[in-house]
Amino acid sequence: SGVNFPDALSMSPVSFKEGVPIFLADGSGNLNDIQKKAIVEGLSDADSTTIAIAGGPNSVSNGTEAFAQGVTAATSNGKVNAVRLGGADRYEASANIANWAVRQGYLSWDGAALAMGSKPYDALCGSILQGKTGSVLMVVEGGNSNSHVLGKLSANKNSISSVKVFGGKASVPMEVRMDVADIFGIPYYEIPELKIYVDAGHGYNDSNNGVY
């Protein structure tokens, strides 16, 4: 959606790494004719004919999903290659986008980044870095909204040697940082750094590891 940013930002590392565009739907979740033409022409010339729809029907309409299904079928001998990556809210959608990107081999859990989900600035600045390093970006907030994101980190912690946090404690609250520290069984050090460092054995040494 071009109105609500988190879904597009969660997909941005994939876009950068794979060199593919993101098309922003309007406030009704629809694409205009120019966008549709560009998608049809792009898929006709591309090696891959997959379309990922970032967000639920409130962000990208069912009509747009139907268009994606039709155009992928038309360019891949009848096979529908359109997948919707949504969730109950932006945080679950972000976790699902990350999980899909890893399963497709586009990105890695290692070096995962967390950024504020209610304002775009930190995630926008960090999304290209995540694309360059081939790592996922997920949005978080305070309260109980982070269970899906934290669940993905916990389920894949054996594949993670570091996690990045974009923004200060007003953006990614202390409670989120503490939750991540708990996942990896390491202490929280309140120093002005942006990374959560996790060693492969989930222990730490005073010079390198901890949650920052």
Image (tube, rainbow, N blue to C red):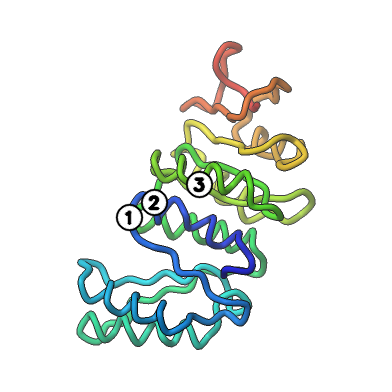
The crowding category of the residue bearing disc 2, from other C-alpha atoms within 10 Å (few below 14, some 14 to 19, many at least 20), is some
Res 19 label: 1
Say above or below: 99 vs 87.
above
The number of discs equals 3
Dot 2 and dot 3 residues touching (CB under 8 Å) = yes
Relative side of 19 to 145, left or right: left
Q: In the image, residue 199 lies at what x, y percent?
A: 50, 25
Q: CA distance from mark 1 to mark 2?
A: 5 Å
Residue 175 visible somewhere in the drawing: no
Tell which circle, 3 or 1, labels the residue nearer the N-terminal end. Answer: 1
Residue at 20% of width from left, 66% of height from top?
Answer: 47
- Report helix, strand or loop for mark 3: helix
Residue at 35% of width from left, 58% of height from top?
Answer: 104
Say above or below: 30 vs 45.
below
Disc 1 residue type (three-letter):
Gly
Residue 97 visible somewhere in the drawing: yes
- Report helix, strand or loop for mark 2: helix
Q: CA distance from mark 3 to mark 1?
A: 14 Å
Q: In the image, residue 159 lies at what x, y percent?
A: 44, 39
Q: In the image, residue 142 lies at what x, y percent?
A: 77, 48
